Image (tube, grey):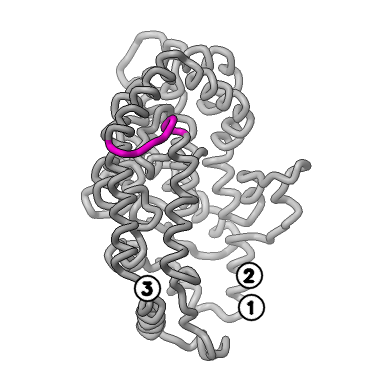
Amino acid sequence: MTKKSARFGIKPAWIAPGLVVALLAAACGGGGDEGNGSTDTAPVTENGEAASVANQIDNGEGSEEEEEEPDSLSDYIGFDFDDPDASAAFAADLERQVQESIVSCMAQEGFEYIPVATPGLGANFAFNEEEFARESGFGITTWYGQEQDVLTEEENFVDPNLEITESLSESELEAYNQVLHGGFDEGSLGSENGEVNIVDSFTGRGCWGQAFDEVYGAQFRVFEELAPQFEDLTQRVEADPRYLEANEDWSECMADRGHTYSSQDAMYEEIFDYFQGQLDEITGDGGFVDPFVGMSEEEIETLTVEEMENLFDQASQEARADIDQDALEALQQEEIDLAVAAFECGEDLDDLLQELYREYEADFVRDNRDVLEQLRS
C-alpha cells in the first residue's frame, strides 16, 4: 500500500488492496461486535447459521441462468467493496470461520476454546473521509493530546478465554499456548530475497495459524502472486491523460487555497515527514515519559489495571508539562486545514480514479483470470 490510504482522505479506487487490508485487520483483530445491531455480523440463514456473503452471491439463489464469467474483481471477491455493509459482513463472516476452525482444532487436542469476537471490525468499512479530515486532518499530529478521547470498545475488550487460561497450571498453560499458537520459527518468516511473507509468517503456528491459512491463505497468495500486475495496473491508470489533467486541476485548486503541490501523490509523499518532524520539535523526545522508570519487573507484574492506567496518565501529564500548547494547536490546525482542502479539491479526481480503475480492470481480470479463479475455489 502507498501513503494514499483511506485515512488520508482517498476513496478506495480499486478493490484488491482494500481487501488485503480488510482481511489482515480481521485476521489480527477479530470479528465484529455482537448484539449491537451493527453490520459487523455475517448474514444468517434459515437454520440459524451464518452464511458466507460470497457463497450467497455466487450461488445466485433461485436463478436458473448460466453464471456469467466474472469481468471485475468485485465478482471474484463476492461483494462490491463500495458497499460498507456488505464489506463488513464479508469480513466478519471470514473471521467467524477462523474462530470456528480454532475451536475445532483445539478440541481435537483436548482443549476448550471460546470464539473471540473483537469489537470494531465494521468501523474499518464505515469510514467517513470528510468527517475525519475536518476533525483529525490526516491523523498525523492530531492524535497527540487526545488519546483519552479516542478510546474505543477495544480498550474494554475481555478475552472470553481468560477464565480458561487462568484456571490452568503453568505446565498446562504452556501446552495450551503451544497448541493454540504453535512454535515460532524465525527462519520461516522471510523469503530468499529477505522480504517478509505475510502468509508464511502465520502458517503452521498452531491452531491459530492453521485457521488463518484455511480462511485467508488463498486470498493473500493470490494478491502476493499478482503484486507486479497490480502495480502495472496502477501505472497504467496514472499515465492516462484524463488522470494527468485531473491532477493539474487538483493542483490549481490547492494553489488557490494557498497550498503548492505539483500533484496529489507529491503531497502524500511530503506530508508525513513534514508534520511528524514539526510534532517532534514541539514535543521533544516524543513527548513521552516512561511510566515504569525505577520499577522492577516484579513490581510491574503486580500492578492492577487501574494502577497501570494511573501511571500512564501521570507520565502523560509530566511529558506535556513543558510543551508549547499554542504551537501544538497551531500545527494540528495546519494539518486539518490542509486535509480539508485536499479532500474538497480531490473529490472529482478521486471519482475519476475509481472510473479509470474500473475501466482498466477488465483487461487485468482477463489477463489474470487463471490466478483469480483461486479466490472462488
Residue displayed at 34% across by 11% down: 64
Q: Are marks 1 and 2 in contact (CB under 8 Å)?
A: yes
Nearest the viewer among 310 and 244 is 244
Instruction: Using the rendered view, name the quadrant where residue 342 is placed.
Output: top left
Residue displayed at 50% across by 73% down: 165
Nearest the viewer among 158 and 325 is 325
Residues drawn in magenta: 257-265
Instruction: Using the rendered view, name the quadrant where residue 331 is placed.
Output: bottom left
For label 3, the residue is: 323
Left/right of residue 229 with respect to residue 312 in the rendered view: right
For label 2, the residue is: 175
Q: Are marks 3 and 2 in contact (CB under 8 Å)?
A: no
Residue 55, image x, y percentages? 41, 29
Left/right of residue 344 with respect to residue 162 in the rendered view: left
Q: With respect to residue 46, does 139 lie above or below?
A: below
How far apart marks 1 and 2 lie (CA) works out to: 6 Å
